[in-house]
């Protein structure tokens, strides 16, 4: 496993802990569909939440959440639609981003962006 992969696994672990503390129920981790992977699929009340986790050690080239570009959003949306078909889901959904800035053993900043984007809407931050 590469250093970047280890950092990603670490960041996802922190994200899961934060989401669970916020009351979300984790349903799936690293759910794959074709070329896409949804890092975390969770439920909050009656809302199905698809969560992308971005982890970076520093912000010199931008914040982690800024790395979710239109290509990545489209892959996530396609995978989310496939997941919904697979479970027969027909109620509310949401796409969130969890940004993790730091590294193991160092101070870490975790931000949860609820409703970060929605299918069919142009998202710009």
Image: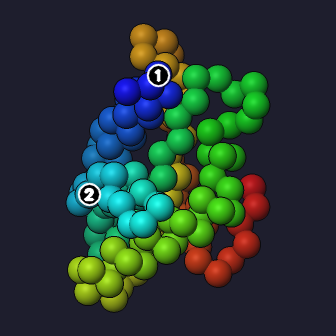
- Badge 2: residue crowd in 10 Å (few <14, some 14–19, many ≥20): few
> Can residue 115 be seen from the camera position used here?
yes
The x, y position of residue 33, in whole percent, is 39, 66
- Residue 89 is left or right of residue 57, and the answer is left
- Looking at the rendering, in which quadrant would you find the C terminus? bottom right
- The count of marks equals 2
Q: Quick check: marks 2 and 1 in contact, CB under 8 Å?
A: no
Label 2, secondary structure: give it: strand
Mark 2–mark 1 distance (CA, rounded to whole Å): 24 Å
Which residue, given by chain and number where applicable, does mark 1 sit on? 3
Residue name at image x 28 percent, y 69 percent: 45
Which residue corresponds to the image point at 53% horizontal and 22% vertical from the top-left?
Answer: 102
Badge 1 element: helix
Residue 79, image x, y percentages: 43, 70
Q: Which residue is mark 2?
A: 28
Q: Is residue 13 left or right of residue 87?
A: right
Viewer-nearest residue: 1 or 116: 1
Q: Residue furthest top?
A: 105
Residue 11: x %, y % from top left = 42, 33
Residue 83, disc: none
Which callout, 2 or 1, points at the residue further toward the start of the chain? Answer: 1
Residue 117, quarter of the rendered image: bottom right
Discs 2/1, front: 1
Q: Quadrant of the image for the N terminus?
A: top left
Q: Residue 9: horizontal and vertical position, in percent?
A: 37, 34
Residue 85 vertical placement versus 55 (above, below) = below
> Foreground residue, 18 or 3?
3
Report whether residue 11 is seen: no
Crowding at mark 1 (Cα within 10 Å: few <14, some 14-19, many 20+) = few
Is 103 displayed left or right of 15 in the figure? right
Residue plotted at (42% across, 72% down): 80
Q: Give the colour scheme of this rendering.
A: rainbow
């Amino acid at each position: 496993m590469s250093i970047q992969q280890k950092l990603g696994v670490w960041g996802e672990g922190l994200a899961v802990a934060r989401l669970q503390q916020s009351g979300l129920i984790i349903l799936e981790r690293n759910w794959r569909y074709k070329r896409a992977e949804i890092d975390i699929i969770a439920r909050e009340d009656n809302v199905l939440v698809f969560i992308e986790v971005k982890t970076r050690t520093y912000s010199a080239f931008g914040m982690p959440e800024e790395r979710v570009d239109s290509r990545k959003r489209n892959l996530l949306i396609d995978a989310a639609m496939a997941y919904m078909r697979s479970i027969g889901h027909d109620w509310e959904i949401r796409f969130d981003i969890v940004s993790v800035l730091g590294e193991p053993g160092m101070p870490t900043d975790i931000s949860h962006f609820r409703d970060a984007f929605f299918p069919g809407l142009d998202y710009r931050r």
